[in-house]
Image (tube, grey):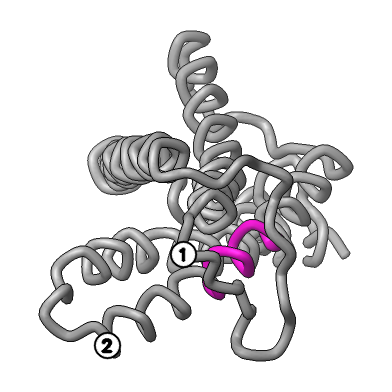
Amino acid sequence: MWRNSPHSYGLIAILFHWTIAILFLGQIGLGYLTQITTGDPRLQFDLYQWHKSLGFLTMVLALLRLAWALAAAKPRPVPRTSRLEAIAASLTHSTLIAMTIFVPFTGWAVASTSPLMIPSFAFNLVLVPDLPLRRSEAAEALWSNIHAYLAYGSGVLAFLHATAALYHQFARRDGTLTRMLSPVSQDVRRGGTPAH
């Protein structure tokens, strides 16, 4: 149940997947809000602090997820999956995992290069030190652009990933989405025993 089985993801992988997905997609929306609230500096400042805090949380969880993914066995592709589909799925998964690390990292770089020198407190509890980068308006602009392009590009990739999962689940009916919703559903369907 906790670990992946040959036919389904375990509870740990499922919790990592959905928690990070919700945080990451929510961060894209929150990042957009920080850009359209210039008329209310106090609100914008608060939104930035939440954006940074959730970004640090997302990056930590994504690193833990990566460690778990490298250590855990991966379920086999669903039946009737072509080699090309398997390669595309693997590349998409790997890219999305990488982006859940790199996008928050580039956001950290933005905060670290900003001439405003505003400290980063994660949830107003922990002071997160700046990265050892040179502060300047040019550096901040560079990292801001990288951060934005990676974030919105990742959002598009996540949309395509979700669309593919829904297609497999409801058009091809191969249980692709079900594997990331329940750690035992595929094993029980195949007459196996859940992984513990």
On the image, the x and y values in percent for residue 65 come to 72, 53
Q: Inspect this view and state whether residue 100 appears.
A: no
Which residue does the image show at 88% across and 65% down from the upper left? 196
Give the farthest residue toward the top.
Answer: 84
Q: Which image quadrant: the N terminus?
A: bottom right
- 141 relative to 111, above or below: above
Is 168 left or right of 121, judged from the image as shown?
A: left
On the image, the x and y values in percent for residue 86 come to 52, 20
Determine which of the numbered discs, if any, sits on residue 43 in the image: 2
Q: Is residue 55 magenta?
A: yes
Task: Mark 1: give few (<14), some (14-19) or many (20+) Cα within 10 Å.
Answer: few
On the image, the x and y values in percent for residue 39 come to 11, 80
Determine which of the numbered discs, if any, sits on residue 116 in the image: 1
Q: Secondary structure at mark 2?
A: helix
Residue contact between numbered discs 1 and 2, judged by CB atoms under 8 Å: no
Q: CA distance from mark 1 to mark 2?
A: 17 Å
Q: Which residues are magenta?
A: 53-61
Q: What amino acid does circle 1 point to?
A: Leu
Which residue does the image show at 75% across and 40% down from the upper left? 6
